[in-house]
């Protein structure tokens, strides 16, 4: 069994290659100063957008911290290219988090020299390591993913209204008219405490990633943004079209964005299999939002097993929760029970709940791929992201409860048969 943490080997036509990364920054029609900042370092690569308040200084200071540490980030990315394990991938996210913390301190220090106004900034950054994209985010700047004709916002806005909506304190209708929609709950330089959202996604050929200040989504709906990204032409032409549409809709704020596009597949018939779709249908992940799924991804290993290979063995340390996403496997328990595991089915849930030795042996019948969440990584999620960890824990408890109910019913049937009641 091999931990590969990557999609199965792809043909050259389906490999992910960077096509272009372009940026635009527009003053808008109602602002006298552009308080946005942009960093575009395609050789690292590192792209970031900052949307400051109190002048251009906070965005500039925050982006300078990222720029000064870009080569260290490149080294972290190289580790992922050599071995894309959860350790290497989580290392990229944690390094980005440390840079955001440094930026927070730097903006605070800059604020001490400015007596007539308060300063702070949002910050959203993205980096690539092969097919992996990592996003770090604080504030209401956003990251969007355009894939196969669908635009998705990957980030949660850190505003009071958005926080109230996520907690269920207000309805979606109340959110639309809330006076707190643009009131930041956190930003770089706002408070010594900082909680950075970290996301990971696996890029596909033909994907587009946008890192943007809120000027874009203040002016344009998701439908209009998607229409611009679907337009024929070059990456530059699509970026210009976005700026044009913002202007046509009144450009109420500074608008700064970076548009990152990957090369499409060379042959349309060759498409990378989306192993995420099957995994997200499993009980543990089915209730996660897009953002929550991308927060979980750095903790998941993709296991590659050959036909006939043993994936886990009874009596060994538990593998953890595994979701079969491709192939078939045979599950056997020490008591002699067996079953066929097909794509979308899981095993090993008890491995998240208990550190006891495994009670099951699983063997690949075909070349197979499985997403695996180990008990130590699950514990990390619970510790570092309690909200997400709590959601996963509830799904796990529900599944184990259902399983216990089935076992109780079977035990009752066995006892009835033993007592001659059946």
Image: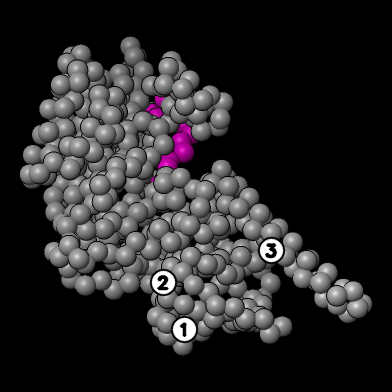
Numbered badge on residue 326 = 2
Dot 3 corresponds to which residue? 403
Numbered badge on residue 149 = none
- Residue at 21% in and 72% down: 11
Question: Is 360 on the left or on the right of 170, as rendered?
Answer: right
Q: Is residue 148 above or below residue 309?
A: above
Kindly report the distance in space between the C-alpha atoms of the residues bearing marks 2 and 1. Answer: 11 Å
At label 3, counting other C-alpha atoms closer than 10 Å, the crowd grade (few under 14, some 14-19, many 20 or more) is few
- In this picture the colour scheme is one colour
Is there any visible trace of residue 213 in the rendered image?
no
* Coordinates of residue 94 in the picture (x, y in percent): 41, 51
Residue lying at the far right of the rendered structure: 419
Q: Secondary structure at mark 3?
A: helix
Segment colored magenta = 184-198
Q: In the rendered structure, which disc, 3 or 1, sits on the residue that comes first in sequence?
A: 1
- State if disc 3 and disc 2 touch (CB < 8 Å): no
Q: In the rendered structure, which disc, 2 or 1, sits on the residue that comes first in sequence?
A: 2
Is there any visible trace of residue 8 in the rendered image?
yes
């Amino acid at each position: 069994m091999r931990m590969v943490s990557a999609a199965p080997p792809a043909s050259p036509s389906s490999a992910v290659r960077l096509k272009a990364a372009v940026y635009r920054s527009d003053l808008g029609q109602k602002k006298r100063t552009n308080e946005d900042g942009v960093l575009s370092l395609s050789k690292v690569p590192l792209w970031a957008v900052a949307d400051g308040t109190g002048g251009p200084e906070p965005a500039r200071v925050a982006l300078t911290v990222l720029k000064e540490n870009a080569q260290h980030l490149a080294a972290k990315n190289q580790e992922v290219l050599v071995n894309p394990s959860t350790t290497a991938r989580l290392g990229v996210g944690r390094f980005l988090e440390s840079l955001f913390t440094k930026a927070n301190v730097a903006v605070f220090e800059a604020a001490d020299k400015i007596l007539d106004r308060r300063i702070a900034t949002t910050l959203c950054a993205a980096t690539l390591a092969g097919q992996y994209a990592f996003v770090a985010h604080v504030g209401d700047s956003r990251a969007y993913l355009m894939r196969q004709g669908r635009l998705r916002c990957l980030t949660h806005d850190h505003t009071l209204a958005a926080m109230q909506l996520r907690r269920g304190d207000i309805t979606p209708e109340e959110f639309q008219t809330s006076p707190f929609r643009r009131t930041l709950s956190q930003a770089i330089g706002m408070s010594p405490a900082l909680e950075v959202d970290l996301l990971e996604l696996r890029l596909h050929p033909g994907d587009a990633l946008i890192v943007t200040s809120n000027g874009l989504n203040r002016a344009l709906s998701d439908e209009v943004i998607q229409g611009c990204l679907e337009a024929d032409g070059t990456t530059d032409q699509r970026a210009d079209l976005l700026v044009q549409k913002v202007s046509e809709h009144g450009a109420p704020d500074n608008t700064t964005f970076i548009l990152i596009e990957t090369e499409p597949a060379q042959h349309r018939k060759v498409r990378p299999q989306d192993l995420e779709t099957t995994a997200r249908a499993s009980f543990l992940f089915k209730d996660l939002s897009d953002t929550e799924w991308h927060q979980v991804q750095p903790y998941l290993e993709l296991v590659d097993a050959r036909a006939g290979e043993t994936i886990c063995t009874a009596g060994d340390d538990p593998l953890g929760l595994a979701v079969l996403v491709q192939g078939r496997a045979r599950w056997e328990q020490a008591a002699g029970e067996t079953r066929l595991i097909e794509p979308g089915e899981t095993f090993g849930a008890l491995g998240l709940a208990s550190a006891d030795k495994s009670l099951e042996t699983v063997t690949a019948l075909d070349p197979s791929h499985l997403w695996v969440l180990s008990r130590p990584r699950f514990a990390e999620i619970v510790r570092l992201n309690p909200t997400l960890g709590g959601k996963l824990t509830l799904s796990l408890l529900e599944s184990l409860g259902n399983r216990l109910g089935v076992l109780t019913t079977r035990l009752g049937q066995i006892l009835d048969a033993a007592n001659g009641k059946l």
